[in-house]
């Protein structure tokens, strides 16, 4: 089996792990119902999707 040549310090390990973080999702306003949604996804509130500037109803949302 392969073994490391030398021990990595805790500081070096911490520097590597410092980049492991989550980013907040980018939210945009739905032009149809003005609810916040993830871009390039169907709106959960109204069920519309924007294609070439036009809103197309993809999913029927029942109240």
Image: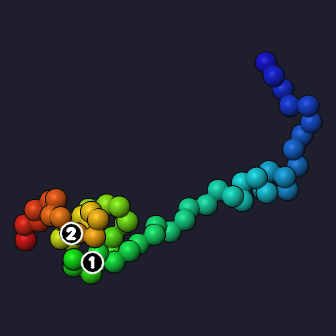
Give the residue furthest to the left: 62
> Which disc is residue 55 wearing?
2
**Which residue is located at x 54 percent, y 65 percent?**
23
The numbered mark, 1 or 2, whose residue comes first in the sequence reads: 1
How crowded is the residue under tag 2: few (<14 C-alpha within 10 Å), some, or many (20+)?
some
Where is 8 relative to 50, above or below? above
Q: Is residue 40 left or right of residue 1?
A: left
Give the residue furthest to the front: 52
In-front residue for pair 27/19: 27
Inspect this view and state whether residue 60 appears: yes
Relative image position of residue 16 (x, y in whole percent)? 76, 52
- Say how the picture is coloured: rainbow
Relative image position of residue 28 (x, y in whole percent)? 38, 74
Q: Does dot 2 land on a helix, a strand or a loop?
A: strand
Where is 36 relative to 15, above or below? below
Quadrant assignment, res 41: bottom left
């Amino acid at each position: 089996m392969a073994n490391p040549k030398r021990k990595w310090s805790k500081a070096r390990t911490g520097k590597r792990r410092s980049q492991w973080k989550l980013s907040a999702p980018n939210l945009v306003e739905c032009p149809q119902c003005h609810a916040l949604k993830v871009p390039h996804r169907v709106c959960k509130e109204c069920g519309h999707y924007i294609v070439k500037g036009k809103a197309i109803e993809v999913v029927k949302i029942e109240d």
